[in-house]
Image (cartoon, rainbow, N blue to C red):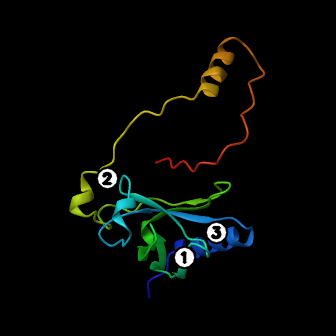
Amino acid sequence: MPEVSTKPYLLRAIYEWCTDNGYTPHIAVVVDSRTRVPMQFVKNGEIVLNISFEATSGLKMENETIRFSARFGGVSRDIDIPVENVIAIYARENGQGMAFEAPNPATAPIAAEQQEESAPMLSSVPVSEPEKKDAGSEENGDDDPEPPKKGGRPVLTRIK
């Protein structure tokens, strides 16, 4: 009997941690031909879904799939996601959670109509103003860098 992946167990554990602490669990998913989601909300071959108790109906987080019903634009939709396509689960309020490796394209074929849109692209990431200032202060011999600013909405950044 093949060994079951730890991923579905980790997803369920982070989901439970989010709900126990009053956070809103979200999952980021790579969309392919096996993923059943409203396609109008897919961007760059990915979708982020609120999987909180309040946002879903009949949530089942199984070892192979995540299934539930949710409303999109007032219309109830059945959602079906292969666990291997989940690339992150996190709390919306603070961004804490866990990221996973994206599925191998050989094992998760992308639908032909999406293949061009979701092809991997390399691009440079602009340096933010505080980082530019920190780099400049190192050159000037300033040992007291400016502390990072607090506040604002947390953002989950996926680094490949």
**On the image, which quarter does residue 97 sit in?**
bottom right
Q: Position of residue 20 (x, y in %)?
A: 73, 72
Q: On residue 118, which mark appears?
A: 2
- How far apart are the alpha carbons under marks 3 and 2? 27 Å
The quadrant the N terminus occupies is bottom left
- Determine crowd level at label 3: few under 14, some 14-19, many 20+ residues with C-alpha closer than 10 A: some
Q: Looking at this rendering, what residue extends furthest in the top direction?
A: 140
**On the image, which quarter does residue 95 sit in?**
bottom right
- Determine crowd level at label 2: few under 14, some 14-19, many 20+ residues with C-alpha closer than 10 A: some
Classify mark 3: helix, strand or loop: helix
Asked whether 75 or 44 is in front, the reply is 75
| Residue receiving disc 1 | 56
- Residue at 61 percent across and 66 percent down: it is 25
Q: Position of residue 88 (x, y in %)?
A: 53, 61
Identify residue type, mark 2. Answer: Ser
Q: Nearer the viewer, mark 3 or mark 1?
A: 1
| Residue receiving disc 3 | 14
Asked whether 6 or 55 is in front, the reply is 55
Q: Earlier in the sequence, mark 2 or mark 1?
A: 1
Identify residue type, mark 3. Answer: Ile
Identify residue type, mark 1. Answer: Thr
Q: Position of residue 50 (x, y in %)?
A: 55, 66
- Residue at 45 percent across and 80 percent down: it is 64
